[in-house]
Image: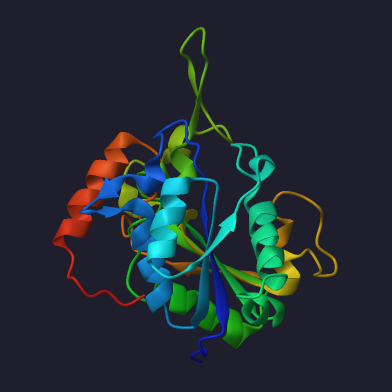
C-alpha cells in the first residue's frame, strides 16, 4: 500500500556533539550535512511537510535557504542527555501553534523523525517505512541494518584488570561460531528513519510501559536496510566515508 503525501517530517539537528563538533553543518560532498537529510525529506514519498528542529544558527540558515520551517530548539532539549522523543514532541507542538505548521502538525497524521547527522540513506527508505506504518496499522516503524561482524553472539566481556575474556551470555565463547555466514540473522537500529503515529509519539498508546523507548508504542515494526547503506556520522572517519559514498552516487536520488 502506498501512502499519500501527508506525513510531517521532523529533522533533529542539535549543535552540540562530543565526537564530531558541528557535524550537522559540516560540509560533506559539497553540501552541509543537514542538507542531505533535508533534500531526502523533501523528496520522500508520503511526506507532506518538513521542519528542522535546531539550536545551531548555521543549520537554521541552511534549512531556511531550503524553504523548510525552522523550529528553535530550547537549550534543555539540546544537551547530550536530551531524548529524541522530547525534541520531536516539542517540534510538533510548536508547529501546531504556529501559522505555518498548524495544518500538517495538527492533522493527527503520521510523523517521520530523521537525524541530521545521517547524510546517507538508501533510496525509498522513508517511503518504505511509511508504507509499512499505514498498511499494518502499527504504532511505529524503524530502520534496521544487519548486525554483521558486530553480532551479539560475538560479543564478549573483557576484564579491565586481568584481560580475561568471557562470553557475554552463556558458557561458550562466540556461541561456538567462527564463520560470519553461520550467525543467525540479527539487526540493529541504523538511524535511517523512524516513522510513527502521532498517538505513539505523544505516549497515548494504551498498555505501553514507561521508558525511553515508550514513544515507539506497542506494535513496533522494522524495515531492513543493506549493511552500510545508512551512514550515521559519529566519528571523523564517518565523515570521510560519507563524503566518498555521496560523491559516487547519482545526482538524482529518490527517497
**Where 43 falls versus 31 (above or below)?**
below
Residue in view at x 44 percent, y 38 percent: 154
x, y percentage for residue 72? Answer: 60, 53
x, y percentage for residue 59? Answer: 43, 51
Left or right side of 242 for 16: right
Q: Foreground: 34 or 114?
A: 34
Question: In the rendered image, which quarter contains the C terminus?
Answer: bottom left
Residue sitting at the far front: 99
Residue sitting at the far left: 248
Q: Foreground: 104 or 210?
A: 104
Residue in view at x 67 percent, y 70 percent: 98
* Image quadrant in which you'd find residue 80: top right
**Residue 113 appears in the figure:** yes
Residue in view at x 64 percent, y 61 percent: 91
Residue in view at x 47 percent, y 30 percent: 18
Left or right side of 56 for 252: left
**Where 108 falls versus 27 (above or below)?**
below
Amino acid at each position: 500500500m502506498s501512502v499519500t503525501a501527508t506525513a510531517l517530517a521532523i529533522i533533529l539537528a542539535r549543535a552540540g556533539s562530543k565526537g564530531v563538533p558541528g557535524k550537522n553543518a559540516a560540509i560533506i560532498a559539497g553540501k552541509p550535512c543537514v542538507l542531505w537529510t533535508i533534500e531526502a525529506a523533501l523528496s520522500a514519498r508520503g511526506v507532506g511537510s518538513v521542519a528542522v528542529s535546531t539550536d545551531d544558527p548555521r543549520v537554521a540558515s541552511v534549512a531556511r535557504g531550503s524553504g523548510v520551517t525552522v523550529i528553535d530548539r530550547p537549550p534543555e532539549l539540546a544537551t547530550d542527555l536530551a531524548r529524541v522523543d522530547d525534541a520531536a514532541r516539542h517540534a510538533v507542538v510548536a508547529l501546531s501553534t504556529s501559522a505555518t505548521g498548524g495544518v500538517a502538525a495538527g492533522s493527527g497524521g503520521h510523523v517521520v523523525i530523521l537525524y541530521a547527522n545521517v547524510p546517507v540513506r538508501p533510496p525509498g527508505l522513508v517511503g518504505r517505512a511509511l508504507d509499512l506504518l499505514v498498511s499494518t496499522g502499527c504504532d511505529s516503524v524503524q530502520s534496521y541494518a544487519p548486525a554483521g561482524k558486530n553480532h551479539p553472539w560475538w560479543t564478549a566481556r573483557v576484564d579491565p584488570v586481568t584481560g580475561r575474556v568471557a562470553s557475554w551470555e552463556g558458557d561458550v565463547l562466540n556461541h561456538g561460531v567462527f564463520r560470519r555466514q553461520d550467525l543467525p540473522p540479527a539487526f540493529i537500529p541504523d538511524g535511517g528513519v523512524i516513522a510513527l503515529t502521532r498517538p505513539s509519539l505523544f505516549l497515548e498508546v494504551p498498555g505501553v510501559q514507561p521508558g525511553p523507548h515508550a514513544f515507539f508504542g506497542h506494535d513496533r515494526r522494522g524495515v531492513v536496510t543493506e549493511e552500510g547503506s545508512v551512514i550515521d556520522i559519529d566519528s571523523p572517519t564517518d565523515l570521510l566515508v560519507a563524503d566518498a559514498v555521496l560523491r559516487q552516487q547519482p545526482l538524482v536520488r529518490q527517497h
